[in-house]
Amino acid sequence: MTVNDSAYLGKGVKVGQHSIIKENARIGNDVVIFPHVYIGENSQIGDGTIVQYGAFIEHDCKIGKSSRIGTNTVLRRETNIGDNSIFGSLSASEGKNWIGNNVLIHSQCHLTTGIIVEDWVFIAPLFVGANDPMMLHGRRRIEKFVPKGPHIKFGSGIAVNVSLLPGVVIGRECIIGASSLVTKDIPDFSIAFGVPARPVKNVEDRWRLQEERYHEFRKRVSEEELAKIMEKILSDYN
Ligand SMILES: CC(C)(COP(=O)(O)OP(=O)(O)OC[C@H]1O[C@@H](n2cnc3c(N)ncnc32)[C@H](O)[C@@H]1OP(=O)(O)O)[C@@H](O)C(=O)NCCC(=O)NCCS
């Protein structure tokens, strides 16, 4: 393993063979880092988090406490993940995005730049989020690229193989059915599916998360604060 002298390792940290920890990275107490992990400059990993085999975490990422970063994941620069969250094996974050607490992201998902995933969201395998409506690759001299990531609100469940078009908002505690393509915003507490996805009914009240959890989340970060955080994360595109 190669740990840069300026990196900080808390008490009880375990670092596996061939792992690399770069300048000014901060690794909290009791973090377990498997072999062949890369942790870039200034990245922070909270207490008790597990970083599994082969994870590649670029610079300036922030991962909270008691989370798990799966095998062979890629977290590009300025990926923010909260506490008690799971980022599943083979999933990739394009960086400059925000993922909350108690989020479960399954394997083989693509978390695009600018995406916001609020607390208690579940995302099943093969999720794709898009952020560039015009696919400006090679054409940025014609139009400026500002990522328009989707926003998945508190407690929503996204079934297998769902794609979200740029900037769509999935409301609070929605269910988006398998293989949906979401092209427009989905209102709070809706069950929606299809290509394009249409809301078909509301989730039953008994299916809602406890209200205290929502209050805890809102106390931690208001809607306005979240918008400001994302504005700051994306400021170098403006
Ligand atoms: C969205 C979902 C919850 C809907 O379930 P439901 O409300 O019980 O719906 P039903 O099974 O009663 O189906 C109602 C109708 O919608 C259709 N339908 C259901 N889900 C659909 C979907 N994802 N896409 C297109 N049509 C769908 C059904 O074929 C049925 O059509 P019909 O009335 O012509 O027969 C379910 O389809 C789903 O996607 N579950 C999540 C599975 C999953 O990915 N889990 C993650 C595991 S890791």
Image (cartoon, rainbow, N blue to C red):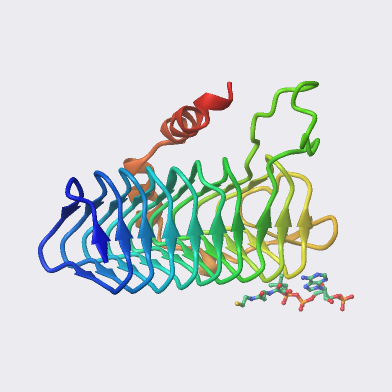
**Vertical comparison of 1 with 153: above or below:** below
Q: From the viewer's perspective, is 185 left or right of 226?
A: right
Q: Position of residue 124 (x, y in %)?
A: 60, 70
Q: From the viewer's perspective, is 77 left or right of 183?
A: left
Q: Position of residue 36 (x, y in %)?
A: 38, 70
Q: Quadrant of residue 120?
A: bottom left
Looking at this view, is 26 or 209 the one in front? 26
Q: From the viewer's perspective, is 187 left or right of 10?
A: right
Looking at this view, is 157 or 136 the one in front? 136
Q: Residue at x 17, y 49 (%)?
A: 5
Q: Position of residue 89 (x, y in %)?
A: 51, 72
| Ligand 1 position by quadrant | bottom right
Asked whether residue 98 appears in the rendered view, the answer is: yes
Question: Which quadrant of the rendered structure holds the C terminus?
Answer: top right
Q: Residue at x 45, y 61 (%)?
A: 103
Q: Residue furthest left?
A: 11
Asked whether residue 199 appears in the rendered view, the answer is: no
